[in-house]
Image (tube, rainbow, N blue to C red):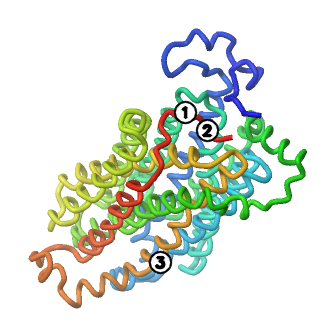
Amino acid sequence: MALSDPSPETDSPLSSTSTHSRPGWLEGVGKYHLMVFFGCWMGGIFDGMDSTLMSVVMPTAIGELMHTADKAIIGPIAAYVTSVFLLGWMTGGILFGIIGDKLGRVRSMIFSILLYAIFTGLAGLAHDWHQLAVCRFLTGLGIGGELVSISTFLAEVWPNRSRALAVGVLITSYQAGVFIAGSINTLFHDWRTAFWIGALPALLVIFLRMAMRESDRWMEAREQQLQQEQKQSHAEALFKKQHAKSLLVGGLAFGGLLVGYWASLAWIPLWIQDLLHNTGTGNERGIATMYQGIAAMAGCGLAGVFSNWLGRRNTIIWSSLGCFATSALLFLSNTTFSSTIYWQCAGLGFFIGLIQAVMYIYLPELFPTLIRASGTGFCLNVGRFVTAVAVFYVGDLLKLVAQHHLATSWLANPQLSTYGVAAFLFSIAYLVAVIAALFGEETRDRPLLD
């Protein structure tokens, strides 16, 4: 029995009875759909805020905890903390994907929000970098789970006609959180206060618990599974031969984005500080992050339009190429700090937002309902292991660049920052997403698999 998209009349008693008269992409969208979107969007904002706070305050926080301003000491420790966070994100994304398929999307959302909100707040109480690393691991666990939950839940609840547009706009929430993280840094220079503010998402759980129920699509599929007494585990179902290509393409494409993102964009604050040579107003890192966040929101918001026009695969390919080109421009054309960097950060942010949102549109379309969260979670997070390892070795790469004068011999510019050269080298990973997408399945105009 095929599962249809929930209609506005049956999806919730709060749904509008006049949604059929709405034109264009709003056709079939009722009040409950909008409520679900709002709840998921707020969750995405806090995901982006809490995941980015560490990058923005990293130089100050690590420097204070280590009692030093020496970048040779701060860099490797910051890389370690970031790697631990990404490992937590990977684990949480896979774990909460399984939880979402087993126990429901809303329960998974609630558990994951509580986890990252609590441990973001506790990070503000850290007395050494080891405690900070533990808090960031557990924060990552919750953030990874939340992003899988909101994208899967909205994809199943929203009407098929405008699903890509809705999911694309949803991912603007993460980038809005990036902007807010930059704003917090400019308003509150105390890194501990920034983390305490990051505990606010716990309040969202009250709204989610009261306003949302599990998707009808998941409820029906789960009921059918129980009636048929299917004993097959999620792992057995997920790793069937027919899903192998989707897992490989999705994992490599998003993994390429992650390596480029975390090893380049997440290191922009340290790179900017290096260019400033400890001068400036102290707000430059936050302002650059705000520019990036605003532009990334625009990219996310247009992802549904581009993916419906060009197709999912082509949009992934062109946005990945845009990430690589703007990374090269940003890190290889600047030897001193200027306001131009803000606009180049915005360009990179736009393409990152575009590819990120398209991946959240694309991945849920590759898998059937009973393994949708697990499959999406696997693809979104298996690449994080590679990313965590890559970011961990940023410190070693910085030393290699400095010791062997790669900026001079290879790029013929001795004035380039070692942070910038290292970040550019990692941005080559964006090309992995290009190659993976060439072999992917196009899902445009295809309804969700049952």
Relative height, residue 159 to residue 177 (above, below): above
Looking at the image, is mark 2 or mark 3 earlier in the sequence?
3
From mark 2 to mark 1, how far is it between C-alphas? Answer: 10 Å
Q: Give the number of the mark in front: 2 or 3.
A: 2
Q: Residue at x 40, y 53 (%)?
A: 182
Q: Nearer the viewer, residue 184 or 23?
A: 23
Q: Nearer the viewer, residue 125 or 326?
A: 326
- Mark identifier at residue 448: 2
**Residue 84: x percent and y percent?**
55, 74
Q: Nearer the viewer, residue 343 or 31?
A: 31
Q: Give the number of the mark in front: 1 or 3.
A: 1
Identity, as a three-letter code, of the amino acid under mark 1:
Arg
Question: Marks 1 and 2: in contact by CB < 8 Å?
Answer: yes
Q: Residues within 10 Å of mark 1 (few under 14, many from 20)?
A: many
Q: Residue furthest front?
A: 241
Residue identifier under label 1: 163
Helix, strand or loop for disc 2: loop
